[in-house]
Image (cartoon, rainbow, N blue to C red):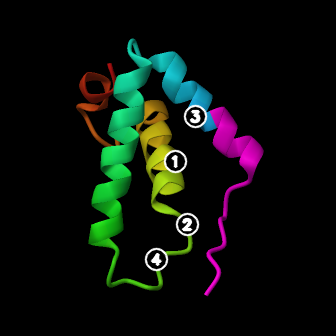
Amino acid sequence: MEKQSSIDSAELSRRSEELIRAASNRYRVVVQVANRAKRRRYEDFDNMDEQLMKPVIRAVVEMSDELMQPEIISDVSSSIV
């Protein structure tokens, strides 16, 4: 089964750049994305239907959505800085 991403590479690049620009420490953002991707990988291991997007891509998309829409999760600003 080949994984199909519903987001194109230009959009992914734009979202990644937004995350890095919003952070005070690039290394910390990369580690947070990696940790979230790792967590999501194990959470979604049994759900084959939800594995259409790779965990790292999904983590970047989720974190950038949280950055742009702070009402999704209230403590996003404290987790990204």
Name the residue at 33% across, 49% down. 36
Q: Where is mark 1, residue-wise?
A: 61
| Labelled disc at residue 53 | 2
Marks 1/2: CA–CA distance: 10 Å
Amino acid carrying mark 1 in the image: Val
Is residue 13 in the magenta section? yes
- Disc 2 from disc 3: Cα separation: 16 Å
User: What is the three-letter code of the residue carrying label 2?
Assistant: Met
Using the numbered discs, state the Cα–Cα distance from disc 3 to disc 4 in whole angstroms.
Answer: 22 Å
Q: Which quarter of the picture shows residue 11? A: top right
What stretch of residues is rendered in magenta? 1-14
Badge 3: residue crowd in 10 Å (few <14, some 14–19, many ≥20)? some
Q: Amino acid at mark 3?
A: Ser
Q: Quadrant of residue 30?
A: top left
Q: Position of residue 1 (x, y in %)?
A: 61, 87
Q: Is residue 55 above or below residue 68?
A: below
Residue under numbered circle 3:
16
Q: Amino acid at mark 4?
A: Glu
- Residue at 73% of width from left, 48% of height from top? 9
Query: Is residue 69 one of those drawn in magenta?
Result: no
Where does the image place residue 73, in percent across and percent down from the top left?
Answer: 29, 41
| Vertical relation: 14 (above or below) 5 | above
Residue 62, image x and y in percent? 44, 48
Mark identifier at residue 50: 4
Helix, strand or loop at label 2? It is loop
